[in-house]
Amino acid sequence: MKSWFSLDGRLYKTLDWIWRQMELNLLFIVGSLPIVTIGASTCAGFRVIFEQREQGDIPMPRRFWKAYKACCAQAIIVWLLMLAWLGLLVGAYFLLAELTSGSQPALLPVVLLVACSLLVFVHIFALMAYAPAQTGALLRQALTLGLSRVLESAGMVIVLIVVAALPLLLPQIWVLWLLFAAPLVFKVQAWLFLRAGGLDTGASTGPGDSHHPKLPTHA
């Protein structure tokens, strides 16, 4: 029984793991409070996950805020561009629905554009965390990943939607959702992102390691 309560015991390790998930969740929430910084907080969350894969235990708050500051300006711009584009598509959908009396053939192109946009957008902040680049290059890489690796990209979108909808579907778990939602999304999406980019080699290497396969680029 003593082994359970030692610093190397299962109980301590379990509680430490739970605390780390709650810590990342709290950091994400605090970083997202201005709303326009949700992108920066997402980028920092992915960076923490990638560094954990590489190094194991890390000083999470320090690494989170370091990544947050590094990507903040670019992430805010990209986040606002994403919202503007999706807002434009949603507005176009309702306008076409009004003009065409809800004609499905007329609305289908807009629906497809929204779907393709989501497949691309889910990669942007993971890319920003894994391999920082100029905004144009990030968007091109995200476009390549999103539309060439549809299965993984769709998985990333589905995970985000399902986790976001959990408190509505299962109100009784809203406390758990509030404590663990962000790290759950980050971990699953990071795994899918690395698979989509051919980066999940199973090695202990991580972001910036030259032994990783390169991300696909757009000519």
Image (cartoon, rainbow, N blue to C red):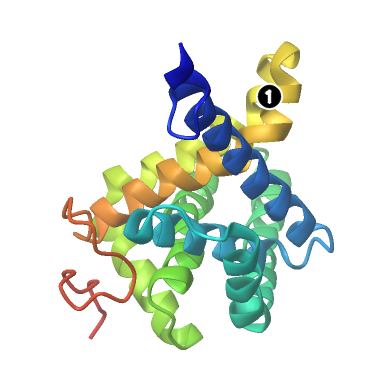
Relative to 94, does residue 204 appear above or below in the rendering? below
Look at the image and tell me in which quarter the C terminus lies.
bottom left
Relative to 136, does residue 12 appear above or below in the rendering? above
Res 80 seen here: yes
Residue 53, image x and y in percent?
35, 54
Residue located at (51% from left, 65% from top): 125
Residue located at (70% from left, 54% from top): 27
Q: Is residue 64 left or right of residue 179?
A: left
Residue located at (52% from left, 36% from top): 17
Residue 184, image x and y in percent?
52, 37
Q: Is residue 169 left or right of residue 56?
A: right
Res 95 seen here: no
Residue 183: image quadrant is: top right
Residue 24, image x and y in percent?
62, 49
SS class, disc 1: helix
Comparing 40 with 87, the one in front is 40
Q: Of the residues shown, which amino acid type is indicated by label 1? A: Leu
Relative to 176, does residue 26 appear above or below in the rendering? below
